[in-house]
Amino acid sequence: MLKLQHGRTLSVEPAADADLVEIRRADGVLELRLKLTEDGVVLQLEAARISLKADESIDVECKTFNLNAESDVGIQSRAGDLRVRGERVYIN
């Protein structure tokens, strides 16, 4: 275990089904986990806020994409069209 600034810790440990790389807050709460499995890497983030910014684009490719919010969800395009494509598009 390596001690980081602000009381955080970094640990790298083998587990039964995967190798784990974890960063925890001073109170032990998990903030970041990399789980290195036989099937590939699993990334887990736990934070008050996650912000992504890119000059060009953010691309996500996956088999299934799930988005859940306890409150509002906002999608906006400031300078162009908003396109939704799918075999079926359900609204409400």
Image (cartoon, grey):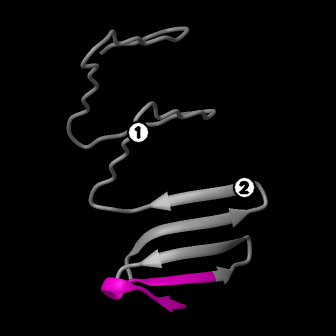
CA distance separating discs 2 and 1: 25 Å
Q: Is residue 65 left or right of residue 42?
A: left
Secondary structure under tag 2 reads: strand
- CB-based contact (under 8 Å), mark 2 and mark 1: no
User: In this rendering, which labeled residue sits more in front, label 2 or label 1?
Assistant: 1
Residue 35 position in % (x across, y down): 63, 66
Residue at x 62% of width, y 81% of height: 12
Q: What is the quadrant of residue 27 in the picture?
A: bottom left
Residue 40 position in % (x across, y down): 72, 55
The image shows residue 76, relative to residue 37, as above or below, that is: above
Residue at x 28% of width, y 25% of height: 75
Q: Badge 2 local density, few (<14 within 10 Å), some, or many (20+)? A: few
Numbered tag placed on residue 54 in the rendering: 1
Q: Is residue 56 left or right of residue 22?
A: left
Q: Is residue 50 left or right of residue 59?
A: left
Residue under label 2, please give it. Answer: 40
Q: Badge 1 local density, few (<14 within 10 Å), some, or many (20+)? A: few
Q: Is residue 76 magenta?
A: no
Secondary structure under tag 1 reads: loop
Quadrant housing the C terminus: top left
Q: What is the quadrant of residue 61 in the picture?
A: top right
Magenta-tinted stretch: 1-12
Q: Is residue 10 magenta?
A: yes
Residue 49 position in % (x across, y down): 28, 55
Numbered tag placed on residue 42 in the rendering: none
Q: Is residue 35 left or right of residue 67?
A: right
**Which of the pair 60/18 is nearer the observer?**
60
Can the viewer see residue 27? no
Which residue lies most toward the front here?
A: 55
Mark before the other along the chain sequence, 2 or 1: 2
Amino acid at dot 2: Gly
Residue at x 65% of width, y 83% of height: 13
